[in-house]
Amino acid sequence: MSHDDYPTDHPAVVTCGLPYANGDLHIGHLRTYVSGDTLARSLRRLGQQTAFVSGSDMHGTPVAVNAEKKGVTPEEFALEYHETYAATFPEFGIEFDNYGHTHDDTNTELTREFVREWIENDHIYEKEIQVAWDPEVDQPLPDRFVEGTCPYCGEKARGDECDEGCQRHLEPGEIEDPVSTITGNPAEYRAREHEFLRLSDFQEYLKGFLGRLEGTDNARNQPKEWVEGELQDLCITRDMDWGIEYPGEGKEDLVLYVWVDAPIEYVASTKQYSERVGEEVFDWTEPWRDGDGELIHVIGRDIIQHHTVFWPSMLRGAGYNEPRAVMASGFVNLDGKAFSTSRNRAIWADDYLAEGFDPDLLRYYLVTTGGFQQDVDFSWERFQERVNGELVGNFGNFVYRSLLFAHRNFEGTPAADVSEEVLAEIDDAMEEFRDGLNDYSLREASQTGIRLSRFGNEYIQRNEPWKLVDENPEEAAQVIRDCVQLAKAAAVLLEPILPHAAERLWAQLEEGGSVHGARLKDCLDAPPENFGEPEALFEKVEDERVEALNEKLEERVDTANADANEEETVDDGGEDAPEAPTGLEPLSEDRIGFEEFQDLDVRVGEIELAEGIEGADDLARLEVNIGVETRQIVAGIKRLHDLDTLPGTRVVILANLEPAELFGVESNGMLLAAGEDADLLTTLGDSEPGTKIR
């Protein structure tokens, strides 16, 4: 592992957290996998040798529970979902170099080798612990077969994790007031011998590791609390039949905890890739064990502890290399509320594909809406806005008008050199792409091609080649030559996030080979002399389509709610709970720390200009004075406020929000407003613009 800028001389491995083979995929799941694919493609764009691997997580209690309900074996149950995932990912352009699963022979043998190394290096010890037991059926209750109360925060929790409260990993025997999920009866604790990985052996190492770790801030900072305090050892065995058997003698009745064999699948999947393509193409041992490599894990933030505490300890204890970076994403919400799979309140992957949408549209939305570690809010209206404004109105519009003019007037690329102005723009975009990637900002890297096409639209509009073609044909040729070069550069820069659209554009330019094999330097290579008439890269999402999609979602949710209500029982005991005010959303269960709140830069601003954005029903462009500067902000208030009356109004804005492009207009901040009517927040007194709100 190095800390050199990418590309390095060492092979890279990009992994994504393993999807659990226990249910259908929705777009919330896809955020991690689309981002991992975008990262792998981007690294290759720089010339970095890269393997992109993952696999299905086949083991664990939920699989066993649900398989029993369906009357099939756990292996049959999990394999069905594994095969579905393996078929679904390519539909979204997620192209793993290898996609395995944790129950295959490679992972099984590698997992046992890891554990044998831990035993040999004296990192394993045996301890008697209290295990939840269902006395009615006379069997132990591993992990998700038991529910109860978290001993740390008092919230309802499942056997291995306080999923509704403090999010802590829970060891067997920790959960209070245990209840069997098999019978619903109170469980009891009984003494059982289990095997532990002595994480305390790695405590000092982990402190140094977190100091070296790259990636997102949450992945680097969140684990510090765990490794700087008393580090609990990890119980690595469970009382159940489904899983990889513990390799120690006399322990044939135990299987390994699912979080032992799951991350080892990263290694196994890389090894399978090497075995398929040959070690001369990619040698799995170099990044993982015997050499140097760049190991990058792209995960959801709910499994940070597993990848920054458990996993590096597991690697260290077996003599493997440590990760260079961990990128932990935020969650995806649906129109301001959390996904609810039980209530069918989700946009399922299959439903999206069935609607006939280009998968690139969703890829673009998931990667470029907010920073990677921030939560993303999806709604069909926002989806429409981003697609129509940025992909159709900006990138697609520039490419189509440039190539159409070039074809009709020059039958392809005009015979002229690229201007110094345009060369400088492309050079800057290439540098911004490198910088964004080395900062692990997929959004920043992915926006470089969009910014380049925005410049192209301004450039062609400023030079008006349709007038020059008769008045000054040489200058017209120069302008269109520049635009064709900008279109090719945008295809190269946007391929990681828009692989299908970039390939279509590459074909329209009649470039040889595939855009997927292009490198960053190809942005500056001359396009072909001749190409045919282009076609539009994207279709506009119409209002009627959005209305129909929302109606479908509401019908599904209503049906699911009705079915759930039929199954629910009413508890008449105790006092009635106070009624919540109608029309208000419930308070979020997720709390943020004071340090996170301090990171928000909220300021008083004064609106100096307010005007509607042409073609956008709801959006207005504001110029807001925040004392030290005037910001351009796009807000969805066009139909809710008389824009002519807003100049001079004091408002409250979030000043350190990452810039976003809405309907082709950059927004550099967020206007704060309450409710569906966008009641603008302001101050009671006369605070000056720029005053910070605390």
Image: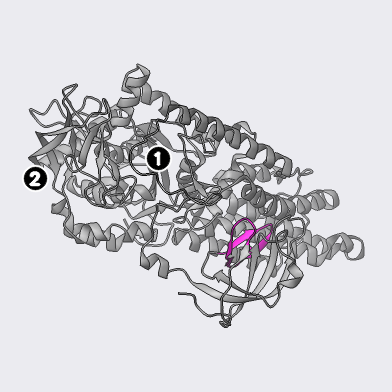
- Highlighted magenta segment, given as a residue range: 659-678
Q: Which residue is mark 1?
A: 53
> Can you say whether 483 is above or below 531 in the image?
below
Q: Secondary structure at mark 1?
A: strand
Tag 2: residue type? Asp
Q: Quadrant of residue 215?
A: bottom left
Q: Nearer the viewer, residue 168 or 84?
A: 168
Q: Position of residue 539 (x, y in %)?
A: 72, 43
Tag 1: residue type? Val
Q: Quadrant of residue 189?
A: top left
Q: Is residue 481 left or right of residue 49?
A: right
Q: Is residue 562 left or right of residue 219?
A: right
Q: Is residue 82 visible?
A: yes
Q: Which residue is mark 2?
A: 122
> Can you say whether 480 is above or below 60 in the image?
below
> Can you say whether 446 is above or below 360 in the image?
below
> Can you say whether 117 is above or below 200 in the image?
above
In which quadrant will I find the C terminus? bottom left
